[in-house]
Image (spheres, rainbow, N blue to C red):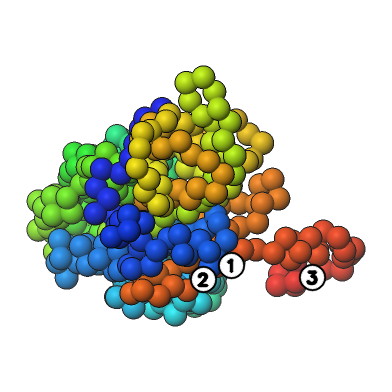
């Protein structure tokens, strides 16, 4: 990932969800973002339904119909986004009971759900079994044993793939790499050959195959080639041992363009899949998140104040790290654009949010005009891991999300009224632990 000092303008505005209309105003599917900012108070996220659908179709046409696509819900779990992808035929990759509830509430098919994650609880396993999901991607022996016991106690079999840690460096940011030895994800590739036959004999387990996921925002195909080659070798080895391996889940992680002008070509990704695991006659699945929704979203925000310095201005906007944590957490830089283009020179600025942390900063930029109070700016490529990672730090309410489709918009998450949060804190309900409560009544 780029560092915070390398803030860029978007090199390919036309490839993104927004364009400049004839008046020079940033628009999404015919909706002017300045008009939207009058209808929905800033800051807010706006997503283009057409761009999300287009991103899904890109996967479909690159991979062909025989590779399943499960959307990694963590990237953007808004029900309208899940529903949009599900209606197009996309399956879902979840990592928590909450995401399962979201998928069910959005009306997505439960038999298209894959459940990943290192810390599935008994309650989550029970909920997923009751929902009849497609597959558990199991990340440890202890988790396998829990699923076995829970499924057997309910008299059902859990469809299980073992998530392999292939010990491959995805060459992405350290904090979002998941497939190196020592990362917390998956089961070491060295252990799988002995574990697989044991797992296939466990009660309550229907072992269907292998899964892997090496990291996120991957911009180099070689790690995929290496990881999938290892998975192919392992599959052949297991089959030589007489084991049945019918499904391979190849994970997600395909990167998007955050302003460099470069992103992986999905047809090259598809070629690697075909070259490595394509001849294994297995059901193949990929789990993209960011690549399906990232470029579809913008964060629209307003300048509050500008503080002039000798060489640059510190520009305080009304969005902050609690709304978009990626710059603070990964030193990521999202391309920024004025909503209304202005003629004239540029002035170096450092864009910061109002939160009381020095890391509440969005980057340094030198392509923008001198910014002043009331100017609208939009951070691009903010559809993934934006709203879904937001928080209420500094008692800032969660901001609205808006879906735009063909000249129309719908508010799909409203600004969270602080009163809702305050009610419980103001009136704590005291209870005694002496009475044993059923699980469903526990605090929470
Ligand atoms: C198991 C799993 N699958 C899929 C994804 C989706 O990743 P991305 O949004 O980078 O495609 C993630 C996140 O890294 C993940 O942990
Ligand atoms: N949250 C990360 C991606 C993590 C993907 C999930 N393992 C980001 O914003 O880039």
Q: Which mark is residue 411?
A: 2
The answer to whether the residues at label 2 and label 1 have Cβ atoms under 8 Å apart is yes
The answer to whether the residues at label 3 and label 1 have Cβ atoms under 8 Å apart is no
Tell me the mark number nearer the camera, choosing from 3 and 2. 2
In terms of secondary structure, where does tag 2 sit?
strand
Q: Is the C-beta of the residue carrying label 1 under 8 Å from the nearest atom of ligand 2?
A: no
Disc 3 marks which residue?
437
Label 3 crowd (10 A; few <14 / some 14-19 / many >=20): few
* Mark 2 and mark 1: Cα distance apart in space: 6 Å
Q: Residue at x 44, y 72 (%)?
A: 409
Label 2 crowd (10 A; few <14 / some 14-19 / many >=20): some
* Mark 3 and mark 1: Cα distance apart in space: 34 Å
Instruction: State how many labels appear.
Output: 3
The first of marks 3 and 1 along the sequence is 1
* Mark 3 and mark 2: Cα distance apart in space: 38 Å
Note whether 331 is above or below 213 in the view shown: above
Q: Quadrant of the C terminus?
A: bottom right
**Can see residue 2?**
yes
Q: Is the C-beta of the residue carrying label 2 under 8 Å from the nearest atom of ligand 2?
A: no
Disc 1 marks which residue?
414
In terms of secondary structure, where does tag 3 sit?
loop
The first of marks 3 and 2 along the sequence is 2
Front-most of residues 314 and 292 = 314
Tell me the mark number nearer the camera, choosing from 3 and 1. 1
């Amino acid at each position: 990932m780029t560092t915070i000092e390398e803030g860029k303008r978007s090199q390919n505005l036309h490839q993104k969800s927004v364009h400049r209309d004839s008046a020079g105003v940033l628009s999404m599917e015919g909706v002017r973002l300045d008009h939207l900012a009058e209808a929905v108070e800033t800051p807010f996220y706006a997503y283009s339904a057409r761009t999300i659908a287009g991103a899904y179709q890109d996967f479909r046409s690159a991979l062909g119909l025989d590779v399943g696509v499960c959307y990694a819900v963590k990237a953007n779990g808004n029900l309208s986004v899940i529903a949009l992808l599900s209606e197009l035929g996309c399956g879902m990759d979840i990592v928590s009971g909450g995401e399962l509830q979201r998928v069910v509430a959005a009306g997505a098919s439960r038999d298209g759900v894959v459940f990943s994650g290192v810390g599935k609880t008994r309650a989550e396993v029970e909920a997923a079994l009751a929902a009849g999901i497609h597959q558990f991607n199991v990340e440890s022996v202890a988790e396998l044993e829990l699923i076995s016991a829970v499924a057997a106690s309910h008299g059902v079999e859990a469809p299980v793939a073992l998530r392999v840690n292939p010990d491959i460096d995805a060459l992405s940011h350290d904090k979002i790499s998941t497939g190196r030895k020592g990362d917390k994800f998956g089961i070491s590739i060295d252990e799988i050959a002995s574990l697989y036959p044991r797992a296939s004999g466990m009660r309550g387990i229907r072992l269907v195959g292998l899964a892997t996921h090496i990291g996120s925002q991957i911009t180099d195909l070689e790690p995929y080639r290496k990881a999938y080659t290892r998975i192919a070798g392992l599959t052949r080895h297991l089959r030589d041992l007489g084991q049945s391996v019918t499904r391979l889940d190849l994970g997600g992680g395909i990167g998007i363009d955050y302003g460099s002008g470069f992103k992986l070509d999905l047809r090259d990704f598809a070629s690697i899949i075909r070259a490595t695991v394509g001849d294994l006659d297995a059901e193949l699945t990929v789990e993209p998140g960011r690549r399906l929704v990232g470029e579809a979203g913008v964060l629209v925000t307003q300048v509050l104040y500008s503080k002039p310095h000798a060489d640059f201005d510190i520009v305080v906007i009304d969005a902050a790290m609690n709304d978009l944590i990626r710059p603070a957490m990964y030193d990521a830089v999202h391309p920024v654009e004025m909503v209304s283009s202005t003629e004239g020179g540029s002035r170096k600025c450092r864009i910061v949010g109002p939160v009381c942390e020095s890391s509440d900063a969005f980057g340094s930029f030198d392509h923008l005009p001198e910014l002043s109070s009331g100017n609208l700016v939009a951070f691009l490529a903010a559809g993934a891991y934006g709203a879904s990672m937001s928080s209420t730090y500094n008692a800032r309410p969660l901001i609205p999300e808006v879906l735009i489709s063909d000249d129309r918009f719908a508010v799909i998450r409203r600004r969270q009224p602080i009163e809702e949060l305050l009610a419980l804190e103001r009136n704590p309900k005291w209870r005694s632990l002496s009475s044993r409560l059923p699980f469903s009544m526990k605090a929470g």
